[in-house]
Image (spheres, rainbow, N blue to C red):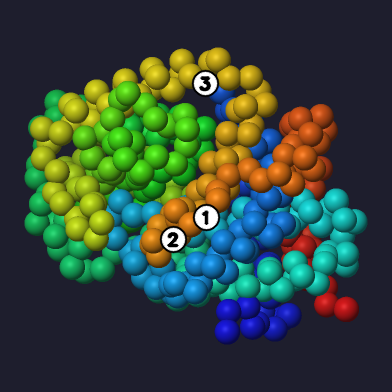
């Protein structure tokens, strides 16, 4: 039964989530946002996720699909959930727990109802993530590699790889850069639809990596009011498969982010293939679609910048929080129950937490200081607090 795990296992998982998330969050908060106060809307949404909202949605989801099945079905191209989704599912929820317990005066004051919900969420996540990572819980556990694709998909990718001339490689990099900026803007300056994974060994000096943007706004399946743009993608998502030679090092974090040396790997690209996924079907995409994708990206950026420039700060924070609370659709879509759920910012969050975000915690909730403590303290007092059973 989901959630039927003992306190020792609960605290083992809390320690694991805390350590990985602390490293990721300490790096993310150093990135300056240009338009949105990402830390503020992150904190606001996380309060809601922990305080009953995410649990109720996932409890309903579990009646329709097994968590392990979500993990297995996510092992494909241009898919959400993905690496970032696996982390965000539990990382954001536990961040909300940390903030709430700080407000309550410590983990000893955690309500019994919430403890049951935490056990359910941790168990759901460990079953889902271990199916996705073939026994691991994080990319970090796998040596900072995201090697989740089955052999059948890898063989299909290899069959579609083509060599590129230098001018085409430069154009490819430009289009990927434009799509990344568009995807970043569309989701209020978070990486919700940007994913990188790999590496897969091709030869002694050649690897295969993937850069994906999913979903893209193609005029269907609208999730956010501001996302109804005139500019529309020619496809619902896009996956770029690249083979690289002469790479010194490459790692993939649990944000689905690639760190590679050399950072500019333009001269290292040898072959490319492009794909889109419609339902369960993966379709090759011709290189002639680079220009339509580039046109979509540049047009969408213009629209988004013009929209966001007119928004007051309150609207930006609420919209960013809406991204984080609505993003659970990546899980509910797999069971076809998204239209039965009321996503977004609820009344309690608007009345209880939002005013304090705007007046006290615009920079950061005080509990976030736990993230920046010396790592030596994590072993005896994890960032997200151990659970205390009375």
Q: Quadrant of residue 40?
A: top right
Structural crowding at the residue carrying mark 1, measured as other residues with C-alpha within 10 Å and reported as few (<14), some (14–19) or many (≥20): few
Q: Return the residue found at the far right.
A: 105
Q: At 82% across and 57% down in the image, what residue appears?
A: 101
Q: Are marks 2 and 3 in contact (CB under 8 Å)?
A: no
> How far is the residue under mark 2 from the one under mark 3?
31 Å
In this view, 146 is above or below 319: below
Q: At 58% across and 36% down in the image, what residue appears?
A: 320
Find residue 251 and report its horizontal and vertical position in percent.
42, 52
Local SS, label 3: helix
Q: Nearer the viewer, residue 338 or 272?
A: 338
Q: Quadrant of the C terminus?
A: bottom right
Q: At 64% across and 83% down in the image, what residue appears?
A: 4
Q: How many marks?
A: 3
In this view, 215 is above or below 61: above
Q: Nearer the viewer, mark 3 or mark 1?
A: 1
Location of mark 3 (residue) = 308
Q: Are marks 1 and 2 in contact (CB under 8 Å)?
A: yes
Location of mark 2 (residue) = 337
Find residue 375 and report its horizontal and vertical position in percent.
72, 56
Q: Is 126 on the left-hand or right-hand side of 384?
A: left
What number is the disc on residue 341? Answer: 1
Considering only order in the chain, which callout, 3 or 2, is on the residue closer to the N terminus?
A: 3
């Amino acid at each position: 039964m989901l959630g039927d795990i003992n306190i020792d296992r609960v605290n083992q998982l809390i320690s694991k989530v805390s350590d990985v998330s602390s490293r990721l969050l300490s790096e993310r908060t150093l990135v300056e946002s240009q338009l949105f106060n990402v830390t503020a809307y992150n904190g606001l949404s996380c309060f809601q996720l922990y305080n009953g909202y995410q649990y109720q949605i996932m409890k309903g989801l579990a009646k329709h699909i097994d968590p392990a099945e979500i993990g297995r079905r996510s092992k494909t191209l241009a898919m959400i959930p993905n690496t970032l989704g696996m982390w965000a599912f539990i990382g954001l929820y536990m961040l909300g727990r940390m903030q709430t317990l700080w407000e309550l005066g410590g983990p000893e004051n955690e309500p019994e109802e919430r403890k049951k919900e935490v056990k359910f969420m941790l168990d759901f996540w460990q079953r889902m993530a271990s199916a996705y990572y073939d026994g691991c819980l994080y990319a970090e556990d796998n040596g900072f590699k995201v090697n989740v694709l089955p052999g059948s998909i890898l063989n299909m990718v290899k069959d579609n790889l083509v060599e590129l001339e230098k001018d085409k490689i430069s154009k490819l990099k430009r289009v990927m850069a434009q799509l990344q900026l568009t995807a970043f803007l569309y989701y209020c300056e978070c990486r919700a639809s940007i994913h990188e994974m790999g590496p897969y060994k091709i030869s002694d000096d050649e690897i295969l990596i993937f850069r994906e943007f999913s979903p893209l706004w193609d005029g269907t399946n609208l999730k956010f009011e501001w996302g109804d743009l005139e500019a529309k993608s020619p496809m619902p998502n896009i996956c770029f498969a690249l083979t690289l030679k002469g790479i010194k090092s490459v790692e993939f974090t649990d944000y689905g982010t690639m760190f590679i040396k050399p950072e500019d790997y333009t001269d290292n690209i040898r072959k490319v293939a492009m794909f889109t996924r419609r339902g369960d079907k993966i379709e090759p995409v011709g290189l002639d679609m680079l220009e339509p994708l580039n046109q979509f990206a540049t047009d969408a950026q213009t629209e988004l910048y013009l929209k966001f420039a007119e928004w007051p700060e309150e609207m930006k924070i609420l919209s960013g929080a809406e991204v984080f609370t609505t993003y659970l659709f990546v899980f509910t879509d797999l069971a076809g129950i998204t239209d039965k759920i009321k996503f977004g910012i609820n009344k309690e969050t608007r009345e209880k937490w939002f005013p304090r975000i705007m007046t006290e915690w615009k920079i950061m909730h005080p509990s976030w200081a736990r993230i920046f403590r010396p790592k030596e303290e994590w072993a005896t007092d994890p960032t997200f607090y151990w659970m205390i059973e009375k």
